[in-house]
Amino acid sequence: MVYLYSYNFKINQTTMYKSFLKFAVFIWALLLLNTCEMGNPLNISKSENGIQTENIVLDVNGTEEQRNIFTYGELITLKFKNVTGLQKENGKVFPQGSIFVLNEKQDTIDRGINIFGEEGMDDDPLNLTVQIQAGLAQNYNKQYTLKVEINDAKGEGSLQMEMPITIIENERFVISTDSIQYKAIYLLDKTTNTVIVDNKVNKADGVVILYEGLKGLQTDEINYVYPGMSIKLVDNSGKVILENENMLDTYNALGFKSANIEQRLPINIAFKEVPIENPVKLTATLFDLKSDRQLVLETDLEVN
């Protein structure tokens, strides 16, 4: 009995040791995986052939970020730090840059070429900046590939990088529609002509609601449409800041060419010089004068 007990104890020790080793290997693999992910949080793939970069930094709207999901209209900036390997001519290097957006089939759906110009650069260290505005609104929530190619106009060196990106609609928007379709709805800063993604607007400048790709409005025999737009702004105290039943009433009889409306419809909003308690509830209802169709946007603004 003693021998059997001792034998069983040895087997248990061995089993425990093996289990411990398996557990240790699992923890090590998990830590290694997390370390790799932490080292490349943007999932950037890079191919360097004669041209190298020390690091690639992502800025979104001027702030360093580590994410691959962007709101429509955000300014995406890729900074290639300390680029080396370009051939010099008269003290300058001549990088050639191209940027591509690829769909899931790796087809090019947008591109920009010669983004660094042709004048050459003498910066040392050489830092290259690539910018693109998050668009592709007709395909929200799909994953794309952002690809940048840097070539040497005076040599054979090249560098390529790719990263996945997803474009989403402003998450602060609540949109409901009855038979009217759209590609994009966003707020525009009239002063800077940039898309507002944080819903912070300047009272003195006002704001523009921009509709792109509108379809579904009833057309007449000459392909004109007759939209209306009601706007209501109510601050946090319940005070009505603005209420207009139809901001497009001057076009009630004339209408708009369907093609023009499909391209872009801007709605300008000005704020009264009255005290405002934030947040301000915006309700914008686009409606069809020739049918019951409508498109409603609701969101909260911070007016300063």
Image: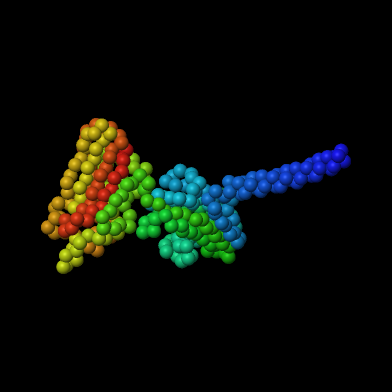
Residue 84 placement (x, y as % from top left): 59, 55
Closest to the observer, 250 or 230: 230
Q: Quadrant of the C terminus?
A: top left
Residue 194 placement (x, y as % from top left): 34, 48
Residue depicted at x 44% and y 44%:
62
| Residue at the extreme bottom of the image, as rendered | 221
Residue 118 placement (x, y as % from top left): 46, 60
Closest to the observer, 157 or 211: 211
Q: Quadrant of the N terminus?
A: top right
Closest to the observer, 211 or 193: 211
Residue depicted at x 24% and y 40%:
233
Residue depicted at x 47% and y 62%:
104
Q: Is residue 261 visible?
A: yes
Residue 193 placement (x, y as % from top left): 32, 49
In the rendered structure, the answer to whether residue 235 lies left or right of residue 36 reads left
Closest to the observer, 98 or 63: 63
